[in-house]
Amino acid sequence: MVSAMTRNRIARLLCLLGLLLPFAALARNVDLATVPTRSTVQLTIYNSEDLTLVRETRVVTFKQGVNPLQFSWANTLIDPTSVELKFRESKTGLDVLDTTFPHDKPQMLYWNVRSDANREATIEISYFTSGISWEADYLAIADPDEKTLQLESFVRVRNNSGEDYEDAQVRLVVGTINLVEKIAELAKVPVGRVEELEREEYRDLRQKAARKMMAPAPMMEAAGAMAAAAAEMEAPKEIIKEGLSEYFIYTIEGTETVPSGWAKRLRSFEAAGVPITVEYRYRPREYGEQLTRLYLLRNDTASRLGNTPLPDGMIRIFRANGRDGLSYLTVQNLKYVPIGDRIELNLGSDPAVVFELLKRKVYRDNLWFQIKGGNLYRKLGEEGMRLELDSQVAGWDEHTVYRQRIRNYTGKPISVQLRREFQGDVAFRSRLNPTLHDFRTVQFETGIPAGGKAELDYEIVARMGYNQKQNRVELQAGEAGR
């Protein structure tokens, strides 16, 4: 005999189980008689649209006849209109009869799947979710001689989607995807009419466009997941250029568990022995009135890089001091770097290299005058001082002589590039072998030995008033100030 107290305890336990079972069902994405666990899951994260394409596979045992599958997205940022169910094998004898959204369960849907026999099959469920983002950061360590550096890249993935993703393969969309361009192609309408589409239609086309662009190679089967992942990582990263778009999809090696509410730092790549060049620059328009030191390198195969473009991120730069320690140099933002482009790391001013810009001389000549009451212009000297007293200055050349003095107190020779921009009709006169960076910017280079100094003189002749003919810089060889 079961006592009344025991019967009451059993009744309370059954009541509690009845309350907990609905919550257990909501915690699972797929609900059958035996709920299968995920076999694989893949996240393709596209930052600029707050869009992540999730693809997950599950091995499901179907019975002959109609099988109900349940999908729920309670307390998540999953877009229910984007959920799709597919079968991995072709000609499986499986067919999705319908999709139902129960009115009393607004965060749930049901698929009715008909099977012609008892069978086991792999299903793929894909959908879009918001709340997952990534950011890149880099660590650069130069050797003591500043000839090479070691570059490490990391990716920090943040998951605020409300869904946990265990053992997920992470793929990052880097670069620019022109969704409007793709949507216009899919909708077969001119680009100018895309904004006229209804909101629901626009969202549907946007999802189709994103699926097409972020489509991966076929998902890994459970039995060969590790081998497939290794093969994918050995292959070169894919760079896609379509119309106005320029982007690539980069796959992080291995799999990681990314719980909701957490951020995880994943290693992206590591490159050792990357050659660098140290250059000093004086460019007032870019760096202000100081001599700036830079590390220059390239994102190419010759530099042990160049397999992929480098995404935006923060880079921290150190130099090995030769005593098993590091000297901090700077931290800066690294802009998106396509394959083959140069990377410029701004280290700021160097206290061991002193730069001075001295104005040595200013004078005017080649004066032209306008006679009062008339339009006649004459140079000073043709009619002496009487003409000057009876007229006003109409044009002249203004000469300014500069000296750039650079002292190198470091223990190694340095390379210096100087670039100045001048407005108006200007003659640049020097013996520095300058070149024109553009029609009003002068550039020249010099080298300074260890412990040495350089004095670089040049003269600016600005043609003013009547003497000014055009807006450009003219290079003239000659001694400054003479």
Image (cartoon, helix red, strand yellow):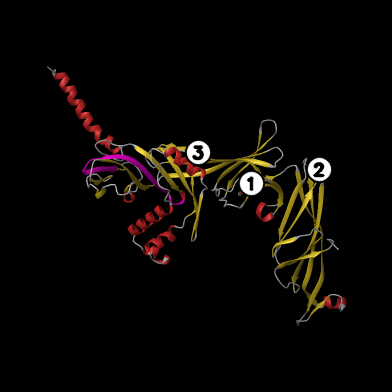
Looking at numbered disc 1 in the image, what kind of residue is underneath it? Ser
Q: CA–CA distance between discs 2 and 3?
A: 44 Å
Determine the residue positioned at 50% across, 43% down. 233
Q: Position of residue 175 (x, y in %)?
A: 51, 52
Q: Which residue is mark 2?
A: 451
User: Of circles 3 and 1, which is in front?
Assistant: 1
User: Of circles 2 and 3, which is in front?
Assistant: 3
Chief SS of the magenta region? strand
Span colored in magenta? 48-71
Q: Which residue is mark 1?
A: 303
Looking at numbered disc 2 in the image, what kind of residue is underneath it? Gly
Identify whether 436 is placed above or below 447: below
Identify whether 20 is placed above or below 136: above
Tell me if mark 1 has few (under 14), some (14-19) or many (20+) residues whose alpha carbon lies within 10 angstroms of its own.
Answer: some
Q: Position of residue 192 (x, y in %)?
A: 42, 66
Q: Which residue is mark 3?
A: 266
Report whether residue 174 is seen: no
Q: Earlier in the sequence, mark 2 or mark 3?
A: 3
The one of 166 and 230 positioned closer to us in this rendering: 230
Q: Quadrant of the N terminus?
A: top left
Q: Is residue 5 left or right of residue 445?
A: left
Q: Residue furthest bottom?
A: 374
Q: Quadrant of the C terminus?
A: bottom right
